Amino acid sequence: MNPVLMIPFIFNGVVGPVIGYISVMIGFVARPFAEVPWATPAPISGVLITGDWKILIVQALVLAIGMITYYPFIKMDIANSEKAAAKADL
């Protein structure tokens, strides 16, 4: 368990679904009407579930926000790992 990465993990777990919900509620994306197998890749499953190509924009937005959110925490984790490795080498 890595406590540094727990913050973006929880944040993205909340923000992604909220963005999806808002995009459906404002009518940007059609409401889901179908079920697809769980292993269907996200871009394909989104289009199959909603029948709307604009879901690809929402998925890209959620992915970009997730990447931006994780970036500083991963940099911090790498720095902490390097400090621990340098300390262990002494």
Image (cartoon, helix red, strand yellow):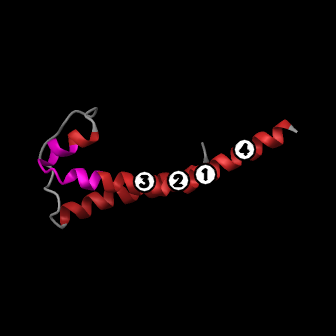
Q: Amino acid at mark 2?
A: Tyr
Is 22 situated above or below 34? Answer: below
Report whether 51 appears left or right of 71.
Answer: left
Q: Residue at x 39, y 54 (%)?
A: 64
**Of the image marks 4 and 3, the number of the one nearer the N terminus:** 3
Q: Residue at x 28, y 32 (%)?
A: 39
Q: Secondary structure at mark 4?
A: helix
Q: Position of residue 42 (x, y in %)?
A: 28, 41
Q: What range is drawn magenta here? A: 46-59
Report whether 62 appears left or right of 82.
Answer: left
CA distance separating discs 3 and 1: 14 Å
CA distance separating discs 2 and 3: 9 Å
**Of the image marks 2 and 3, the number of the one nearer the N terminus:** 3
Q: Amino acid at mark 1?
A: Lys
User: Farthest right residue?
Assistant: 90
Q: Secondary structure at mark 1?
A: helix
Q: Residue at x 56, y 56 (%)?
A: 72
Is 72 situated above or below 41? Answer: below
Residue 22 is drawn in which quadrant? bottom left
The mark closer to the camera, 3 or 1, is 1
Verify whether residue 85 appears in magenta: no
Q: Which residue is mark 3?
A: 66
Q: Which residue is mark 4?
A: 82
Asked whether disc 1 touches disc 2, contact meaning CB atoms under 8 Å apart, the reply is yes
Q: Which residue is mark 2?
A: 71
CA distance separating discs 4 and 1: 11 Å
Q: Which residue is mark 1?
A: 75
**Of the image marks 2 and 4, the number of the one nearer the N terminus:** 2
Point out the image quarter for the C terminus: top right
Q: Amino acid at mark 4?
A: Glu
